[in-house]
Image (cartoon, rainbow, N blue to C red):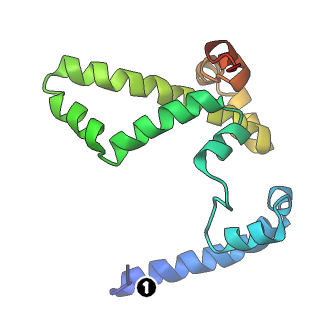
Amino acid sequence: MAATTDEARTIRQTAKDDAAALWPLIQSSPHFQNYTDSQRKSLRKGDWGVGWNWNDLAVEAGLHKTYFTSTYPFLSGHVHSDFIGAIQNGQASTLQIQYMLGSGHMMVIVMLLGHFAHHYASLFPPAKHVLLGAGEARVIAEKWNLRAEDMDFLYPPHD
C-alpha cells in the first residue's frame, strides 16, 4: 500500500531505517551464515521460505511429518475459508458446537506453541533464559512440547 499521509511516510521511513540498522546484525548471525548464497539472496528479498515448504520447515523444527501434513491442510483450510471449513463454521450455531469445533484446534495450537517455545529457546540464549525462569508457563510449555519421536508410536512406518 502506498503511504499517502505524512504520518504514513514517516512510519515507512522509520521502518526502512530500522531494517537498515538490523541488516548488519542479521548478516553476521551464524544462523544466516548457515544458508547458501542463493538462500541468503532470497532471504534478503523477503522470501523467508528459501525454497522450502511448510512440511520441510516443520520437520526441520522437529515436528512429526505425518502429524503435520495431516493437520496443517485442515487448519489452513479453516483459515483460508475452504469448503469444509466454511461448512463447519456455518454449522457452529450454538456455543456447545463452537466449543467442540474450537477445542481440537486449541490442542494443536498449544502443542505448536509449546514446541516453538523450546525450539526458539534452543536457538537464542536470551530466550532460553526467559523460558527457564517462566515458572508455571515453563511447565505447560514442557508438557506440550511434543516432538517427532513422541508421536512415532501413532504413525508406524508403512511396509
Residue 147 occupies quadrant:
top right
From the viewer's perspective, tell me whether residue 3 is left or right of residue 68. Answer: left
- Name the quarter where the C terminus is drawn: top right
Q: Position of residue 115 (x, y in %)?
A: 64, 30
Percent x, y of residue 26: 76, 66
Q: Would residue 67 be found to the left or right of residue 12 on screen?
A: right
Instruction: Name the amino acid, label 1.
Output: Arg
Residue nearer the viewer, 122 or 15: 122
Res 36 quadrant in image: bottom right
Q: Residue at x 38, y 84 (%)?
A: 3
Return the residue at label 1.
9
User: Residue 75 versus residue 6: which sits nearer the camera?
Assistant: 75
Crowdedness near tag 1: few (<14), some (14–19) or many (≥20) residues, C-alpha within 10 Å? few
Name the residue: 80% across, 69% down. 27
Query: Which residue appears farthest toward the left when viewing the image?
Result: 93
Residue 118 or residue 71, whichever sits in front? 71
Residue 68 lies, in percent from the top left, at 57, 33
